[in-house]
Amino acid sequence: MDVPESFLCEGTFLVGKNIIRTRYQSLEHYIEITEYSEGYKLAYDNENQDSHNDIEINGLPGKIFRKNGITTIVLDYAGAILEMESDLPEETLMEIAKSIKSVNE
C-alpha cells in the first residue's frame, strides 16, 4: 500500500472478532484502514451522507461515502471487506486504495 511519506503508522489493533484496524497519522490528516474477515456484511445508513456512489477499484466492487469532509471507501475483496476512512482529498484516498493489491497487504 502506498501511503504518503508524511504519514506514520500509529499501530494495528484488533478491534473486534476478526476486525483489524490500522491508523496512519500526519500532522494534518489521518487514514484508518479496517479489515473485516470473510463473513462480515457491512450496512451503512445512507440517509445522512453528503453523497454516496458505487465505485470499482482494481476490478473490485465498492462504495464511496462523503460526510463532513470525511471520505470512506468500502471494497469487497471476494467476501473480505476493506474500509478506508480519511480526511484526505477524495482523489488522494482513491489513489491509495488503488495501490492495495490484497486485503492482507
Image (tube, grey):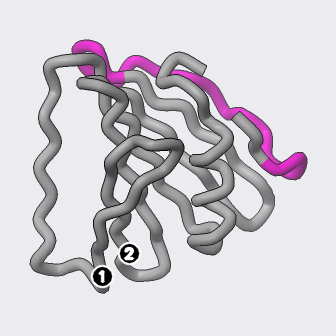
> Main SS of the magenta segment?
strand
- Residue closer to the observer: 60 or 29: 60
**Would you say 78 lies left or right of 3 here?**
left
Q: Is residue 6 magenta?
A: yes
- Residue closer to the observer: 63 or 46: 63
Image location (x, y in percent) of residue 81: 31, 32
Q: Amino acid at mark 1?
A: Ser
Which residue appears at 57% of the width and 71% of the height? 90
Q: Secondary structure at mark 2?
A: strand
Q: Which residue position holds label 1?
A: 51
Q: Amino acid at mark 2?
A: Arg
Which residue appears at 32% of the width and 22% of the height? 19
Q: Is residue 43 magenta?
A: no
Image location (x, y in percent) of residue 82: 39, 36
Question: Contact (CB < 8 A) between labels 1 and 2?
Answer: yes
**Would you say 42 lies left or right of 26 here?**
left
Q: Which residue position holds label 2?
A: 66
Residue neighbourhood size for the residue with mark 1, other residues' Cα within 10 Å, grouped as few (<14), some (14–19), many (≥20): few
